[in-house]
Image: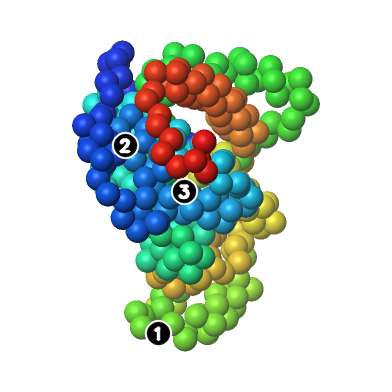
Amino acid sequence: MPFSYGRFAKTLPTIGLAAGLLTAVLPSGPAHAQVAIIVNGDPITVYDIDQRAKLMNLTGQKATRQQAIEELINDKLKLSAAKGYRLEITKSDVDNSFANIARNVRGTPESFAKNLEGAGVNPDTLKARLKADLAWSQIIRGKYQSSLQIGEKEILTTLENRNSKDVGYEYVLTPILFVIPKGADGMAESRKRDAELLRVRFQDCKSGIPFARALRDVVVRDTIRRNSADLSPQLRDVLDKVEVGRLTPPEVTSGGVEVFALCEKKETTADTPARRALREEVFSEKFKEHSNRYLKELRKGAMIEYRDEKTQ
C-alpha cells in the first residue's frame, strides 16, 4: 500500500441535490440499477453495493453487504467534500493509479482489468474507489498538514525504544540488459542462460563491465546509486546476498533479461529502511486518526436517504 497543498475552503455545500430529488421521482430501472441510497444528492445503486462487496472480498476483507454500504457512503462523502474544496481528480489521475496497481501485480492495465472482470468485478468499481481515495488523500494532507509532520527526533527515539536495527546502505549498481527483440518471447530462457554464463565470468566491475559491453545484443546502462531505504524488502534481500563486484540473478523484464552489477556497497546514515518504515507507520496512524474524525464530521452534516429497506 503513500500519497503540500494550499488552503481549502471551510464550507461543504450540498452537491447534486436537484439531481437526487429528480432521481427519487423517476421510475425504477432494472433491479441492479435501482437506487438504494442517496448521499448529498448522489445515488448509490444496488449494483454499486454488490460490486463493492465483491471488490472488498477479492482483496481478502471478507466484507458483509453492510460494510460495502458503509464504504460506499464514505466514498460519496469524500467526493462531495472534494467538490466543496473545488478539488478535481481527473480520469488521467485515476488511470495512472490503476496502472500502478497493475504494475505492482506484474501486469498491464488491460490484463489487470481482465482479471477483475474474470472475478466478477467491473474495473470501474475499483476506479471509483481510487478516485475517492485520491481526493481524500489530498484533502486530509492539506487540511491537517502541520499535524502530519513527523520530526526526526521522534523517529530516532522510537527506534531506540524498540531496539530496532538502524543500518542503511548506499548501492552503486550498473544495469546490464540482454536484449530480446520484440516478438521473440521464446528467447527468454536462452537469454537467461547467457546472463548466467556472464555471472560466472564476472568477478569485478573494472574488468567485467567492459567485457559485458563487448557481448552481442547486450546493453550496459549508466551506473545508478540507490539507498536501501528506497528499495523494496525483496530487492534488499537480493542485494544482501550478492558480493561486491558480482552480478544479481537474471530477471526477465519488458526489454529482455536484466542483471545488475553491484560495484559498491557502503553504510549510510542518510536514511535507513527502519526509519523509512517507521516514518510511514507514524504517518499512517496520524492520517487514519484525522481521516476518521473528519468523516464523522461529514456524516453529521450529510443528507443520507435510505430508499431500500435492506440498506437501513
164 over 216 or under it: above or below: above
- In the image, what residue occupies the spot 59% across and 25% down? 285
Crowding at dot 1, Cα within 10 Å, few <14 / some 14-19 / many 20+, comes out as: few
The spot of residue 306 in percent (x, y) is 43, 35
Q: Are marks 2 and 1 in contact (CB under 8 Å)?
A: no
| Eye-nearest disc, 3 or 1 | 3
The spot of residue 171 in percent (x, y) is 55, 46
Q: Counting residues from the N terminus, which is met first, the one under dot 2 or under dot 1? A: 2
Image-quadrant location for residue 308 = top left
51 over 228 or under it: above or below: below
The spot of residue 16 in percent (x, y) is 24, 32
Give the spatial CA distance, label 3 vs label 1. 44 Å
Q: Secondary structure at mark 3?
A: helix
Q: Counting residues from the N terminus, which is met first, the one under dot 3 or under dot 1? A: 3
- The answer to whether one can see residue 236 in this image is no
Q: Which residue is mark 1?
A: 184
- In the image, what residue occupies the spot 43% across and 50% down? 46
The spot of residue 246 in percent (x, y) is 61, 61
Q: Amino acid at mark 2?
A: Asp
Q: Amino acid at mark 3?
A: Ile
Q: Secondary structure at mark 2?
A: strand
- The answer to whether one can see residue 54 in this image is yes
Which residue is more in the foreground, 221 or 164? 164
Q: Are marks 3 and 1 in contact (CB under 8 Å)?
A: no
Colouring chosen for the image of the structure: rainbow
> Is residue 172 rendered to the left or right of residue 222?
right
288 over 189 or under it: above or below: above
- In the image, what residue occupies the spot 57% across and 81% down? 193
Q: Amino acid at mark 1?
A: Ala
Q: Which residue is mark 3?
A: 49
| Eye-nearest disc, 2 or 1 | 2
Q: Which residue is mark 2?
A: 42
